[in-house]
Image (tube, rainbow, N blue to C red):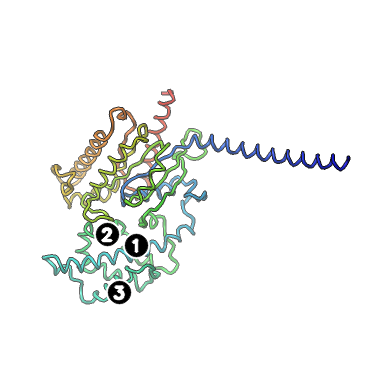
Amino acid sequence: MGLLCSRNRRYNDADAEENAQAAEIERRIELETKAEKHIQRLLLLGAGESGKSTIFKQIVYIFLFVYNMQIKLLFQTGFDEAELKSYLPVIHANVYQTIKLLHDGSKEFAQNDVDFTKYAISNENKEIGEKLSEIGGRLDYPYLTKELAQEIENLWKDPAIQETYVRGSELQIPDCTDYFMENLQRLSDTNYVPTKEDVLYARVRTTGVVEIQFSPVGENKKSGEVYRLFDVGGQRNERRKWIHLFEGVSAVIFCAAISEYDQTLFEDENRNRMMETKELFEWVLKQPCFEKTSFMLFLNKFDIFEKKILKVPLNVCEWFKDYQPVSTGKQEIEHAYEFVKKKFEESYFQSTAPDRVDRVFKIYRTTALDQKVVKKTFKLVDETLRRRNLLEAGML
């Protein structure tokens, strides 16, 4: 009898412990569910090379919090040293790929252009150019040594390469070219560790989906919203991965690189990037699941746009063919920017059903590489969304 009672007691104790564990799991699930309800999902969309991923990296630096699909804590600098070091092969690859594009582009122009002589690489740099082009075509790149960096610098300074760089929009030359070419000696140091700026300039195509959770006013302030920002690949073959993210989104942040009005797509060299952006923007606007979703349009890469607009006419793009310059210098820059902004506004209202026109739509001028601009912009986005939430709750 005593043995039976002892067994029953053990079973009861085990049941009680199991029930307590189950109750604790249920409590945690309930708390997490409640917490999830207060997290607003932001979807970062745009065509390839629009600067989305640079903005994403800026958010990591500025607002920190939780990064990527794995829950990974970050320090105040955004990336720890190991994370920074992981970008070293990416940066070196960017250097090799860029100098190959310039070298091969120069040879192509020298063969096909009427004024072919200015694209002919000097005799002292021809052998170096062939060597670097071969390296740039490999799958695995060597560490950037001082010797290789000097050879790249010599080739970069060759008049033929500089003439080719002027026509960079025809060759898919990345925006980071000037920055990395000016820092070759530092990038080739034996103990080189990429800086925050180096990582921001580094170009690596986003594949799949990455996310960050952040608050523009700080995690512990009750008045601040908590956001989960999703970044997805912008190239055509990556867009099919967007669809499952469309439901339950508080706001879409659409990035449009306004400096790329004279450039073609990486995946289709017959397709103008601005025309692709226009069509993608209009397609996203028409998605049924975004009926009440706020739209934040980032007219990005303004820093490049303001330099380019004084050299390359805006009306080279089919969408902007009716543009007429009115002045020079800063006045012309502002005039051109306002023209582009108006085009996007018209596109928004033409692609938005009458019953959706009252959803929030804001346009921001951005430069993804400028941390102050990105921080200020996201503060404004935060204020806009908080005000919308208060209005919907009947508190304003």
Image point (29%, 69%), residue name = 153
Sequence-wise first label, 1 or 3: 1
Around disc 2, counting alpha carbons within 10 Å, would you say few (fewer than 14), some (14 to 19), or many (20 or more)?
A: many
Residue receiving disc 1? 94
222 over 64 or under it: above or below: above
Let me know if residue 159 appears in the view. Answer: no
Coordinates of residue 382 in the picture (x, y in percent): 40, 36
Of the pair 187 and 229, the residue shown nearer to us: 229
Let me know if residue 353 appears in the view. Answer: yes
Q: Within the image, what quadrant is residue 159 found in? A: bottom left
Q: Element type at marker 3?
A: helix
Quadrant (top left/top right/bottom left/bottom right) for the C terminus: top left
Residue receiving disc 3? 131
Q: Are marks 1 and 3 in contact (CB under 8 Å)?
A: no
Sequence-wise first label, 2 or 3: 3
Residue receiving disc 2? 173
Q: Within the image, what quadrant is residue 279 found in? A: top left
